[in-house]
Image (tube, grey):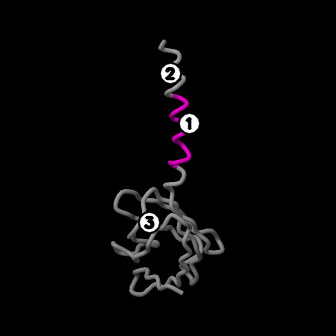
Amino acid sequence: MDIRRLVTLAMLAGVLALPGLAAAANTIYGTLTGPDGPNASLVLACDRATATANADKAGSYRLTVNDRGRCHLRVNNMPAPGELVFVYEDATRYDYEVTKAGGVTRISRR
């Protein structure tokens, strides 16, 4: 086999592998209500990956991470580890009420 054929086969193998990468991406989404919900900053921390996002002015958010299982969601200045969430292959909705007490942000599931 010549080098051009090897390069072509390698590129084709890479393109065929891309859909598998997209399938590995897992999403949580939902809304944050309360005075500190809209425009909040979020961090989703899993064992092998982390994702960050900002809620929009209505409090909606979406985080996608290349990991599954037990993860922790933090909002604004929440102390680590944050709220336990489970990330699955299918998108999962988590809606929270955001409160602030003593300068620390807390979230509770609605």
Residue that mark 2 sits on: 7
Circle 3: residue type = Leu
Image coordinates of residue 98 in percent, x first then y, are 51, 82
In front: 69, or 52? 69
Rounded to the nearest angstrom, the CA distance separating label 2 from label 1 is 12 Å
- The residue lying at 50 percent from left, 67 percent from top is 41
For residue 45, side relative to residue 60 (left or right) = left
In what element is the residue under mark 3? strand
Circle 1: residue type = Val
Residue that mark 3 sits on: 44
What residue range appears in magenta?
11-21
- The residue lying at 55 percent from left, 80 percent from top is 95
Give the vertical position of 39 relative to 7 (above or below).
below
In what element is the residue under mark 1? helix
Q: Nearer the viewer, mark 3 or mark 2?
A: 2
- The residue lying at 62 percent from left, 68 percent from top is 56
Circle 2: residue type = Val
Q: Nearer the viewer, mark 3 or mark 1?
A: 1
Q: Earlier in the sequence, mark 3 or mark 2?
A: 2
Rounded to the nearest angstrom, the CA distance separating label 3 from label 2 is 38 Å
Rounded to the nearest angstrom, the CA distance separating label 3 from label 1 is 29 Å
Residue that mark 1 sits on: 15
Q: Earlier in the sequence, mark 3 or mark 1?
A: 1
Image coordinates of residue 97 in percent, x first then y, are 53, 84
Check residue 12 for magenta coloring: yes
